[in-house]
Amino acid sequence: MARFLVRRIAFAVVVIWAAVTIVFILYFVAPHDPARLIAGRQATAQTLADVRHRLGLDQPILHQYVSFLGRLVHGNLGYSYVNSEPVTTIIGQDLPVSASLGLGAAGIWLLIGVGSGVLGAVRPRSLADRATTGFALFFYSMPTFLLGELFLLVLFFRLHLLGIDFFPGSGYVGITQDPYQWLVHLILPWLTLALVLSATYTRLTRASMLDVMGEDYIRTARAKGIGERRVILRHGLRAALAPVVTQLGVDIGQLVGGVIVTETVFGLPGLGQQVINSITRQDLPVIIGLVVLASAFVVTASVVVDLFYAVLDPRVRLS
């Protein structure tokens, strides 16, 4: 286990370094002028020179790269080009919004996706199986932005016209500020993200369960007189969860940028919105800070998935 974790940490460092380096190179290859964007179109040449000097953009690219890596090693992501605010502060303000959205939706899409997939697999070609398959196909082909707009139209706008203001149309309230309002503001975003992604988990779970339920050890368990519910949940589902865990690791790892559409539709000030704003404003320190965070999410999710493999399948050993 110790050797496994050491290798994974070393791999994480390499992945983060490669991602940051690629973004840094692309930033200087693409035509841009953050000093002009900050100073405005009417800025004089002296003003532009002063802005470039303050941002360190008048230094050689190699010097900027080495300086940035040195700060990164010490946990310093630098300061925003736009408002001179620490990047760690910006990410710290937006991370709870995206984490609340992503993790809450993950719990819902796992419950719906795995549950409907198991239901369809244990009763193949039944009415329940056809219903879950139709559910998966419908929401799998549904764009996230369209489903979000439909929710806003029906559950916010139409109910608002009837004098029912249960579902807010936009905004976010922190859980520490008001837990009830936090929950209410996230119900529609959660459902939007969860219903679209749960379709994938329904299909994965159903296909995997159909393969597993035909194995010899399932027939042996039934022959021993073990109850059908225990056979399905303890023997069948446990073995069928490997592809589901893999997909979950990918989805959780991509939460930093994967909720951009949902956050935009519902006006949530999360990391997705910060990604768009930073790219639009050519704010390199914030962009790289978000890349570091996204890389850390992906690598961490990969490690957790490998650990779950060992839990789900006794034949898997971490070494």
Image (cartoon, rainbow, N blue to C red):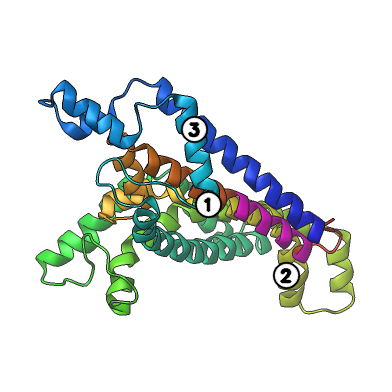
Q: Earlier in the sequence, mark 2 or mark 1?
A: 1
Q: Is residue 256 magenta?
A: no
Residue drawn at x 61%, y 55% is: 300
Determine the CA span between mark 3 and mark 1: 15 Å
The answer to whether residue 124 is seen in the rendering is no
Task: Name the spot of residue 88 as percent of width and height, x first.
Answer: 40, 55
Residues 210 and 283: in front is: 283
Q: The residue tagged with tag 3: helix, strand or loop? A: helix
Residue drawn at x 65%, y 41% is: 14
Q: Which numbered disc covers residue 65? A: 3
Q: Quadrant of residue 244 in the image?
A: bottom right
Q: Which numbered disc covers residue 116? A: none
Q: Is residue 76 left or right of residue 4?
A: left
Three-letter residue code for mark 1: His
Q: The residue tagged with tag 2: helix, strand or loop? A: helix
State the extent of the magenta-drawn residues as a range: 299-311
Q: Is residue 309 magenta?
A: yes
The answer to whether residue 114 is seen in the rendering is yes
- Residue assigned mark 1: 74
Q: Quadrant of the N terminus?
A: bottom right
Dot 3, how many residues are within 10 Å of its Cα: few (below 14), some (14-19), or many (20+)?
some
Residue drawn at x 74%, y 76% is: 230
Determine the CA span between mark 2 and mark 1: 50 Å
Task: Name the spot of residue 156 as percent of width and height, x first.
Answer: 20, 62
- Residue assigned mark 2: 232
Q: Is residue 312 left or right of residue 247?
A: right
